Amino acid sequence: MFKNILVASDGSKCGDKAVDLAIDLASKYGAKISALYVMDFALDFSYDELDDAGGAVLDDITAKGKEKGVVVVEHIITADPIQDMATMIRKINPDIAVFGAFGKSMDNEEEIDYSKIGSVAENALKVSKVPVILVK
């Protein structure tokens, strides 16, 4: 059913849950994981800080995949996670995409309004030509 599962994560709580679900799906269906970390320069961090953070997130995803016998292909991309979403999904060419409903900006919130979703997740739903699973 699935051969290539895209999971995008920024290392947030929802992102980590999305990774766990994607790896479980990949293990069940014998699929590979295309792990995506977007270096967004709209955030006020240096290239080195973003690259280090992305490397750590992708290393974690790869380690989790290895534990379950799942092949992980890492993608670290410099882009705008909203404007470039359709292009990123198209180029990775997954059968399904898994995203956290919220990113790191919500990690420290005491109460999250789950009737809403983050802007990146919302945009993924709008532009993706493949099914999208949002994880909260």
Image (spheres, rainbow, N blue to C red):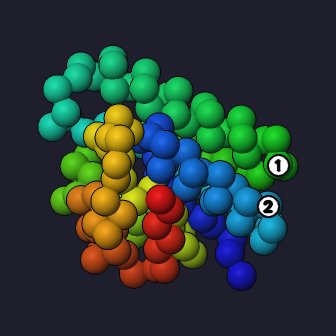
User: Disc number at residue 52?
Assistant: none
- Nearest the eye: 4 or 109: 109
Q: Is residue 74 above or below residue 60?
A: below
Residue drawn 15% across and 37% down? Answer: 42
Query: Relative to 104, is 102 above or below?
Result: below
Query: What x and y, as percent, mark residue 135?
Result: 50, 62
Contact (Cβ within 8 Å) of mark 1 with mark 2: yes
- Left or right? Give the position of 11 relative to 70: left
- The quarter of the displayed image where residue 86 is located: bottom left
Q: Secondary structure at mark 2?
A: helix
Q: Amino acid at mark 2?
A: Ser
Looking at the rendered structure, which numbered label has been put on residue 27? 2
Q: Residues within 10 Å of mark 1 (few under 14, many from 20)?
A: few
- Give the structural element (helix, strand or loop) at label 1: loop
The residue carrying pointer 2 sits among few (fewer than 14), some (14 to 19) or many (20 or more) residues within 10 Å by Cα, namely some
Q: Is residue 13 visible?
A: yes
Q: Quadrant of residue 31?
A: bottom right
Q: Quadrant of residue 122?
A: bottom left
Earlier in the chain: of badge 1 and badge 2, it is 2
Residue at 63% from the left image edge and 66% from the top image edge: 4
Q: Establish if 107 lies above or below 136.
A: above
Q: How many marks?
A: 2
Instruction: From the top left corner, tell me how far across and down residue 35 is, in percent.
Output: 54, 49
Residue type, mark 1 in image = Lys
Task: Tell me if 96 is positioned left or right of 128 in this view.
Answer: right
> What residue is drawn where x is 78% and y is 71%?
29
Q: Whole-percent x and y of residue 118?
A: 28, 58
Residue situated furthest front in the rendering: 111
Q: Relative to 59, does residue 98 appear above or below in the rendering?
A: below
Place of residue 83 in the rendered image (x, y in percent of width and height, measured from the top left): 19, 59
Mark 1 = which residue?
A: 68
Name the quarter where the N terminus is drawn: bottom right
